[in-house]
Amino acid sequence: MKLLKKILIGIAVLTALIYFVAIPYIHKEAKKFSPSKTAIVDLEGSSVEVDYSSPSKKGRIIFGELVPYGKIWRTGANEPTTFVTTQQIKIIDKTLPAGRYSLWTIPNKETWKVIFNTEIPEWGVTRVDGNQTTHEAKHDYITVEVPARKLQEPVEDLSINFEDKEINHKSQKFLSLAWDTTKIMVPIYK
């Protein structure tokens, strides 16, 4: 009985060490290779902010290889990318209430799906194999589809920003994502 008790205590201590020491250490080390970045824009009085981890290309082919086509992607590295708006906005023609969302994408050659999800997991992929995302479709609030553009020059580090473009003599704001030779632009409105 004493031996069983010692074994159970040993397992509990080992589990606690892995959960409270090893996993946070691995996450901290991973962030050195994909630094955190933030993009902020004022959208007619509404503050919109995107926080993400920016991995580097490092000579790799990103879309279609490192990030497979047709599969959900955490849209960055480390924790899922977050999207925060202080007031209700529109993403293309869909209403997104004020709040904090995780931002997921499904890249394809011609178009991408961009997903705003109400759940924000601690990490973007599972701890078991690292290949499955922690995305749960049941928490998807809105999904939009946008065209993918081919860039002439590759972008080394994943870049998520807000851009202004003149369309029909009006300024239009876009959430843009560029990496490797691909760029998407998602129209956002107040």
Image: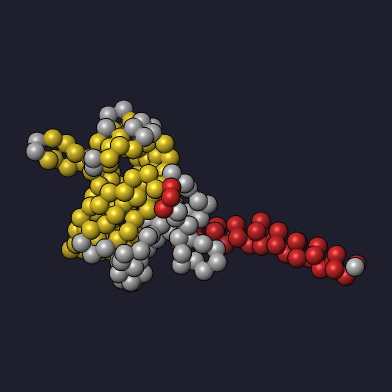
Residue 136 placement (x, y as % from top left): 45, 54
Left/right placement of residue 113 relative to residue 50 reads left
Q: Where's the C terminus, which quadrant?
A: top left
Q: Where's the N terminus, which quadrant?
A: bottom right
Q: Is residue 174 above or below residue 104?
A: above
Say whether residue 128 is visible: yes
Residue at (76, 61) in percent of width and height: 13
Residue 63 placement (x, y as % from top left): 30, 66
Q: Is residue 95 above or below residue 33?
A: above
Q: Quadrant of residue 96?
A: top left
Residue at (27, 49) in percent of width and height: 144
Say whether residue 29 is visible: no
Q: In which quarter of the image is residue 153?
A: bottom left
Q: Which of 176 and 28 is in front in this view?
A: 176
Left/right placement of residue 84 relative to residue 109 reads right
Extreme left residue here? Answer: 168
Q: In this view, does 122 lie above or below 156?
A: above
Q: Which colour scheme is used?
A: secondary structure
Q: How many labels does the image show?
A: 0
Residue 92 placement (x, y as % from top left): 23, 42
Q: Quadrant of residue 35?
A: bottom left
Q: Nearer the viewer, residue 66 or 37?
A: 66
Residue at (55, 57) in percent of width and height: 28
Residue 67 placement (x, y as % from top left): 35, 66
Extreme front residue here? Answer: 138
Extreme top residue here? Answer: 45
